Amino acid sequence: MQNQPALTLSHQLFMPFTRVLLLITLACLNACAANPTGGANFVLMSEKGEIKKGKEEHEKILEQQQVYQDPKLQAYVEKVGKKLAAVSHRPDLDYVFTIIDSPDINAFALPGGYVYINRGLMAFLTTEAQLAAVLGHEIGHITARHAVQQQAAGTTSNILSTAVVLVTGVSTLGETASLFGGALISGYGREMELEADGLGAEYLIKAGYEPNAMVEVISVLKNHEDFTKKTSNRGSAYHGLFATHPRSDTRLQEAVGKAGTLDQSTVVTAAIDPAEFRTSLTDMIIGPTLQNMTGDQARNRYYQTLLNYTMVFPDAWTFAETPTTVTANDATNSALLKVEVQRLQENIEPRVYLRDNLHIPDLQQSEDLSQFGLSGYTGIRSDTQERIAVMYYGRRAFLFTGTSNTDPLSKAILESIKSFRPIARNEGIFADPVKIAWIQANENLTYAELAKESRIPEYPEDTLRLMNADYPSGEPVAGEWIKIAN
């Protein structure tokens, strides 16, 4: 018998590697599951696991992101979202809709039924149908199990990478496999977004909305993108929705058009009152708030707009206010700081004011206060051990009374008193946030005129056009409702 040729090293390595790939392939085939929206997907997570994972990630989001506190607006978003969820491919999920207190243009979804929309995006929507388009798109990601598919693809990529290294011992091949896996995942982006668009359009029409609202939202986002480039402002793009779509996207138009051919017996007949959208968005904050800031601005800062002052209370302290007083305390009521105001009747030194007007003759650890152009005096009362201070601001004397039972708390009270200052001109937006209001246009109304009265700090005319879908050069039409910023 003729001897068989010896196997080369590459053959010896290739054969076990082939067996590993075969095993991986068989595992992948076993993991294919029917997608609720039709077809098959490769997933490695059960629906129960998906819901559990979504809940875990939702709790992390609530720890990391500030939720916008407006019960009226929250109820409205839930109403619209649940109307769409009810006609989706997964109506039995317990959907949770959350408004994030951020001025960024964004919305996103987590597996298992969790949908998020930033108030920053809502400020630029003009109809309930557009809001429904955003929510419907995110619901489409959930019903198609896109996050679960990406998780499975990432897991498979890691398995493949490890298998190559174990069989060949060559790490560079493992890196190549990882790159392939990464390309596979990133390649889902365009297709998944288009699928979510199509599903969202389907849910829109089934819930009684015009599916063309999907296309309208493209214009909203693209106009904002153009504005951001023009002004060089920092701004975050929507993470996925239409992010890869050009203004005229044939495939998106096809997805929307397909939704329009649905069996009309599945369509909900619903009267949509435009006034409900306006009422729900009224008083929603525009732009950043203190919750969105970092550093010193993000601390527990208090603003008193009537008396035009601000100060920083110790971290985690809460406060209660009246028109002229504020009282702050820690969680255990171990410390308290009260601020009140009196009219200055005569021009005397702050030290003398405490001694003669408040009848506090004896202060320990006393010191002059000089901060932010203001003058004052402080010390510890010998009889009650309270921290007492007075600060002169204009023709008013601001009085501070602090109690504490530990030295660190006493120090924190003094630091808080020393943070007292007038509200700066450029932080009025934090002291009195800009909010949405509505007016009905007449034939003479222009955005240039509205901009003169607007409290939007930068580019008010362009911003008002963006908010009303009239960017870059449109003008109000007589009789239509226009968003303004008060």
Image (cartoon, rainbow, N blue to C red):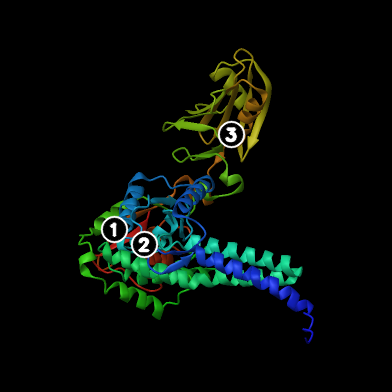
Left or right: residue 162 compared with residue 235: right
Q: How far apart are the alpha carbons under marks 1 and 3?
A: 41 Å
Binning the other alpha carbons within 10 Å of mark 3 as few (below 14), some (14 to 19) or many (20 upward) gives some
Towards the viewer: 325 or 70: 70
Left or right: residue 259 compared with residue 111: left
Q: Are marks 2 and 1 in contact (CB under 8 Å)?
A: no
Towards the viewer: 33 or 393: 33
Q: Which of the marked residues, 2 or 1, is nearer the chain's N terminus?
A: 2
Q: What residue occupies the far top of the structure in this picture?
A: 383
Residue shown at 30% from the left, 60% from the top:
87
Q: Which mark is residue 314?
A: 3
Circle 2: element type: helix
Binning the other alpha carbons within 10 Å of mark 1 as few (below 14), some (14 to 19) or many (20 upward) gives few
Q: Which mark is residue 136?
A: 2
Q: Give the amino acid at mark 2.
A: Gly
Q: How far apart are the alpha carbons under marks 2 and 1?
A: 29 Å
Q: Give the amino acid at mark 1.
A: Ile
Circle 3: element type: loop
Q: Which residue in the structure is indicated by mark 1?
A: 439
Q: What quarter of the picture does the N terminus occupy? A: bottom right
Left or right: residue 334 compared with residue 439: right
Circle 1: element type: strand
Binning the other alpha carbons within 10 Å of mark 2 as few (below 14), some (14 to 19) or many (20 upward) gives many
